[in-house]
Image: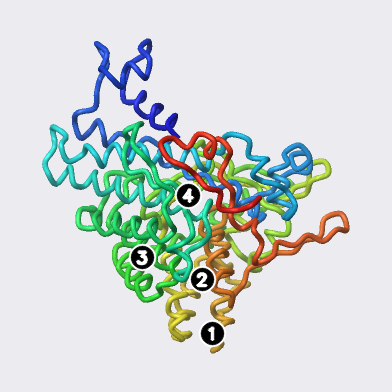
Amino acid sequence: MKNIYKKVACLLALGLTLASCDDYLNDVPKGAKSPETLADYEAFLRDEYNTRLDILGATHLLNDQFVTAATLTSNRLYNANYMWDENADRIALKVSDESTYYTTYSGISAFNLIIENALSTTKATEQEQRTVWAQAKIMRAMNFFYVTNFYADTYVASTAATKLSVPLITSANINAPSKQVTIQEMYDFILNDIKEALPYLPKVAQTALHPNLGAGYAFYSRVYLQMNNYTEALKYADLALAENNKLFDWVAFYEANKAIIDVPNSYTTAVSPMGYNNVENYVFRHGSSRSLGREPSIPVERAARFETGDARLKSRWKVRTVGADTYYYSILSGMYNFGGITSVEVYLIKAECLARDNKITEALAILNTVRKTRILPASYQDISTTDKATALNAIYKTKSNELLQTLTPYADARRLNAEGIYKVSFTKVVNGITYTLKSDSHLWTSPFPQGATQNPGNGTITQNVDK
């Protein structure tokens, strides 16, 4: 853990090339710059390395990302997750590093640095200081939410006070102690960070990388939903939608680009509409990659779970065979908001909360509002039912397709499996063999990498799974 903070501390010595990091921690070398102004600290918010939230293991487990046969043969950890191998010792396979853990905590370190110093910086008004301080609080809370929902069990009220989550680190000091807190303590901390930040978040942020007020409300809603608190989740969903209720029109995007998309055996790319300027964005954050390019391919079986006529599927992937592998290959190029929050997620949170309250007609009206911007007119029909389970399952299906490649389908599945009513499980047949991911599988919680447990900094880390 300590190496993360040393790395961030070294980055603060802007322009420093020869002096060691340990020297820097004691004295600022001549010619180096120690951050003093608010702009110096705000730069860490717009540093896109800090915006990255990697959930590769989760996308493998859900089969939301295609893995080639050759990779499955050579990478045993990928194979364990992708092929749902209950017998694999994933702890032994995570011998050192894992981007999910280290990039998330590296971001936490940077946000801690801002939170500790923003209110005493120079060349800024108090309001400007408070804005950056609040934005760092939201970003830190998002990182803790991600890492908790990856390495710890999902939130269950009856067990949250006794089960461990992840290390809670609130200082950028490399010598600061850390404690692996309970799930309840972590959620209380996350909720408090959001509560303290909300009064100072701007309605319009500096850039798409900076959380605005809508992002604060939307994230509040996401956290409360994960806690099964539908009343509060609905309250903050409504507040978020009051800030931004726009939906991107995927049907119009497909129509505008179908001359490229529909060419047989052609994989020429259209520009991704899922980048910084998408109208649905509350805040933009990268997923597993922060580079321009194609998004990950998806398995044929995963593509089959989209609705017929779904313009998102048609606009993003096209079936392709390379050697022994057949999959859906990306036909977009650009950036993708896989780590941030968008209005469509909030619409679907609201729909679930209404359905949970037996307001089925209102819930389906919201769901169909989303679907009309996604499903081609020739295939579109309103979903209409009075059955609560049918309505909720339709919402979950749309949401898992909408937020493919993000943490949300994984977090939702874990939440629903813990509840035990709308369980999520998967089955597939490969080379005549049937594989199953059960709703109660231990695979739904990822083990910490050995690099973290063997070098936990000034604390200890207890594994949350046996293998």
First reached walking from the N terminus: tag 1 or tag 3: 3
- Indicate which disc, 3 or 2, sits on the residue closer to the N terminus: 3
Residue where numbered disc 1 is placed? 388
The vertical placement of 417 against 206, above or below, is below
Residue 372 is tagged as 2
Task: Give the mark toward the camera: 4 or 3.
Answer: 4
Q: What kind of residue is marked 4? A: Val
> Residue visible at 57% across and 75% down?
394
- Residue 442: x and y in percent read 64, 58
- What is the CA distance from the residue labelled 2 to the residue labelled 1? 21 Å
Q: Locate residue 428 relative to residue 21 in the image: left or right.
A: right
- What's the distance in space between the residues labelled 1 and 3, CA to CA? 25 Å
Q: Contact (CB < 8 A) between labels 2 and 1? A: no
Of the residues shown, which amino acid type is indicated by label 2?
Answer: Lys
Q: Nearer the viewer, mark 3 or mark 2?
A: 3
| Residue type at numbered disc 1 | Lys
Residue highlighted by disc 4:
147
Mark 3 surroundings: few (<14), some (14-19) or many (≥20) residues within 10 A: some
Tell me where residue 400 sits by quadrant.
bottom right
Above or below 307: residue 169: above
| Mark 4 surroundings within 10 Å by alpha-carbon count, few (fewer than 14), some (14 through 19), many (20 or more) | many
Q: CA distance from mark 1 to mark 4?
A: 32 Å
Inspect the image, locate mark 3, and give the three-letter code of the amino acid beneath it. Answer: Asn
Is 359 in front, or is 6? 6
Q: Which residue is mark 3?
A: 245
**Marks 3 and 2, how far apart in space?**
15 Å
Above or below residue 321? Residue 307 is: below
Left or right: 230 as drawn, with respect to 402: left
Rate crowding at label 1 as few (under 14), some (14 to 19) or many (20 or more) other CA atoms within 10 Å: some
Q: Is residue 267 above or below residue 414?
A: above
